[in-house]
Image: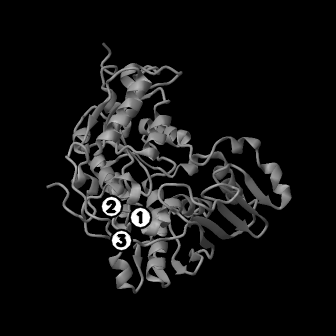
Amino acid sequence: MDQSRSRSRREFLLGTAAATAAASIVSVMPSRVLGRDGAIAPGDKIALGVVGIGPRCTYDLTAMLQLPDVRCVAIAEVQAKRRDSGKSLVDQHYGNTDCAVYRDFRELLDRKDIDAVLVATGDRWHAAASILAAKAGKDVYSEKPCGITIADCQELADTMHRERRVFQAGTQRRSVPNFQKAVELAHTGKLGKLHTLHASVYIPVLENTWLPSQPIPPREVVDWNLWLGPAPWRPFNQAYVDGRWRGQWDFDSGARLLDWGAHTVDLCQWANQADDTLPIDYEPFENNIVCRYANGVRLIIDFLAQPFGDRSPHYITRLGTCPVRFIGDRGSVETGDEGEIVVQPESLQSEIPDATKRVRGLDVSAHARDFFDCMRSRGKTAANADVMRRSHIASHAAALAWILQRKLTIDPVKEEFVNDDEANRLRSRPSRDWTV
């Protein structure tokens, strides 16, 4: 057999060879081995593992299962009923019983045949699980918010660079047509000079009351220690694992501001061509947080929706959830998850194709495709680690301004608050030793 053909799928996907060596490999490999010309060799499928499976992960995974060059081979989940449900979803799709399940995700990461992981745990676990996955040689697609502190986001991005991993933040609206078109209008000067950006978020909450203690279930039913992970210990209550962790400071991210802000602030960053920086000032008001970039553009984070549990917010604009608005001196554009784009002046309407409304903002299909394509090319994803780092840190800085109820100024290079020791201490949180 040709020696180049005998190279393992793992060697190709990891791309650890020097650029010149990689180029020579590609030049002699048949195109069908690389997945070109519509032919995907069975051994060339990307092996996917899942860390944490709940409602959002099920949505993500259902889209990923449709991709012909990706195969989900394992699921790790601390709750037995979710493990069983996830395995059933995968096995029914493939028509077999091959999907392995694990209570402890470290067993999944130990598997050398797994190339990528989808991290879709609760917020408290996103950064730690993604970092461990990268160190285990896996590329990572992480649901947002990717880190519940500024320090988490910094360490996560640094690890992806150090380990040379492909990373995609689950801020999928960067890959959805109506949001892409809105950003295009800003980038091409159709709105004139940008001066104001609007990012919608939930009304922030700050909660840390403990629910009553209940008997801890057997570890195989719910592994409470692993469920808590790096978060502080507290007594077990079934409501936490059923979703009542949301809004809790110990488990959630930035007073819930990042639930939408990880998307909407990110889109404003993109529109302002600020992926390599972040706003420098953050000032809280009753109904919003006003931020300012060094170039003078204002980012207004509007409190639009009241969260309750895992249900939909009771206030949603006609444009849908996660609406954003970009305003320039010659026009404006506004859009949200329903796909409609509203522009001013009316003459800009001719710029909007009808096709933008065919994909809703929750759709992860194109974003997942971008991730797996970048695994092959070793290129940068739409929401790579650097993009995530800046937009998440901006969101966290805004949340801390709201929590402390004062204006904060951050050095966008050092990613430190200026003359504010208390704010700087809140850039990180203690991490519990969950490994015992």
Instruction: Describe residue 309's horizontal placement relative to residue 173 as left or right.
Output: left
Answer yes or no: is residue 18 visible: no
Is the N terminus in the top left, top right, bottom left or bottom right quadrant?
A: top left
User: Is 307 placed above or below 285 here?
Assistant: above
Instruction: Describe residue 72's horizontal placement relative to residue 194 as left or right.
Output: left
**Label 2, on which residue?**
155
**Label 1, on which residue?**
253
Instruction: Describe residue 309's horizontal placement relative to residue 423 as left or right.
Output: right
Instruction: Tell me if label 1 and label 3 are in contact, CB under 8 Å.
Output: no
Residue in the picture at 42% in, 65% down: 247
Q: Residues within 10 Å of mark 2 (few under 14, many from 20)?
A: some
- The disc, 1 or 3, on the residue closer to the chain's N-terminal end is 3
Closer to the eye: label 1 or 3? 3
Rendered image coloring scheme: one colour
Residue in the picture at 20% in, 46% down: 219
Instruction: Tell me if label 2 and label 1 are in contact, CB under 8 Å.
Output: no
Q: Quadrant of residue 51?
A: top left
The answer for how far apart the CA atoms under marks 2 and 3 are is 25 Å
Q: Residues within 10 Å of mark 1 (few under 14, many from 20)?
A: many
> Label 3 is placed on what type of residue?
Asn
User: Is 77 placed above or below 4 here?
Assistant: below
Instruction: Name the spot of residue 168 as percent of width and height, x first.
Output: 44, 48
Taking the view exactly as shown, the residue that stands out farthest to the right is: 347
Taking the view exactly as shown, the residue that stands out farthest to the top is: 1
**Label 3, on which residue?**
208
Instruction: Describe residue 353's horizontal placement relative to residue 385 as left or right.
Output: right
Secondary structure category for the residue under label 1: loop
Answer yes or no: is residue 129 visible: yes
> Label 2 is placed on what type of residue?
Glu
- The disc, 2 or 1, on the residue closer to the chain's N-terminal end is 2
Q: Residues within 10 Å of mark 3 (few under 14, many from 20)?
A: few
- The disc, 2 or 3, on the residue closer to the chain's N-terminal end is 2
